[in-house]
Structures are given as C-alpha cells and as structure tokens.
Image (tube, helix red, strand yellow):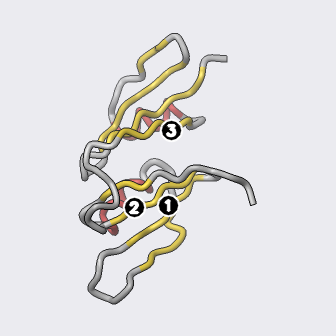
Amino acid sequence: MDEEVIPILHVVDAAAAVRWYERLGFVKQWEHRFEPRLPAFVEVARGRVRLFLSEHQGDARPDTLVYLRLRDLDATASEFGVQVRDAPWGREIELRDPDGNRLRIGTPTE
C-alpha cells in the first residue's frame, strides 16, 4: 500500500459536487451512506489524485483550500474560464467548487 493524504471536502449535495469535479477530470469511485436517506460520503479520483466529498456535518470546514498539481492546467483554465497566473514556483489557477471549497491548481515550473 502506498501512503497518501486524501483531503475531505464538505459538500451539501454530493451528486452535484461529483458533476462539478468531473469537469476537472475526476471520476466517482464509490459512494457510501449508512442508510438510504443519510448523508453521502463519496470518493472521486483523477489518476492517483483522490478527494473525499462528504455531506456529513463536521467532517470538514467550508472555505477549505486544497492545492492540486495537475498536468493540463491550460485546458482546465479554459474549461472554467479563468486566467493562468505565473508564480516563481509554477503556473496556477484558483477555483471554488459549488460549496465554496477553494482549489488552487498548479503546474510546477520545470
């Protein structure tokens, strides 16, 4: 098993959140609910990059910031209509998902 960190982001509507994250190239891996009407806990993945999306109160705070390193920064910026910024360490964009979670997405300078 590889060791890793998987951020947990709070979402109000997991199905809507999964649709938004699909625009970033993530794919839903699985969903868990203790009972049919209870909150969902979902994993989305893009290659080896994974996120947990949780409807459970208290699992994560709103306005969380997660940094993602992704290869296709220009395509992602175009998909969301944002400008790529140059920084000394790389190129970046920042997005907010529908629940207010902040995603800073970058590609390191080579």
Kindly report the distance in space between the C-alpha atoms of the residues bearing marks 3 and 2. 15 Å
Nearer to us in this view, 70 or 81: 70
Kindly report the distance in space between the C-alpha atoms of the residues bearing marks 1 and 3. 14 Å
| Quarter of the image with the C terminus in it | top right
Q: Which residue is mark 2?
A: 53
Nearer to us in this view, 70 or 59: 59
What's the residue type where badge 3 is placed? Leu
x, y (%) of residue 37? 27, 86
Q: Secondary structure at mark 2?
A: strand
Residue at image coords 46%, 14%: 86
Residue at image coords 45%, 75%: 31
x, y (%) of residue 45? 55, 57
Kindly report the distance in space between the C-alpha atoms of the residues bearing marks 2 and 1. 8 Å
Q: Which residue is mark 3?
A: 68
Residue at image coords 41%, 54%: 21
Q: Secondary structure at mark 3?
A: strand
What's the residue type where badge 2 is placed? Leu
The crowd level at tag 1 (other Cα within 10 Å; few <14, some 14-19, many 20+) is many
Choose the circle earlier in sequence order: 1 or 3: 1
**Dot label at residue 33:** none
User: Would you identify the image quadrant in which residue 42 lies?
Assistant: bottom left
Circle 2/circle 1 CB separation < 8 Å: yes
Taking 80 as reference, is 42 left or right? right
x, y (%) of residue 47? 63, 53
User: Would you identify the image quadrant in which residue 92 lies?
Assistant: top left
x, y (%) of residue 91? 50, 21
| Quarter of the image with the N terminus in it | bottom right
Q: Which residue is mark 1?
A: 44
Residue at image coords 34%, 89%: 35
Q: Secondary structure at mark 1?
A: strand
> Of the residues tagged 2 and 1, which is closer to the observer?
2
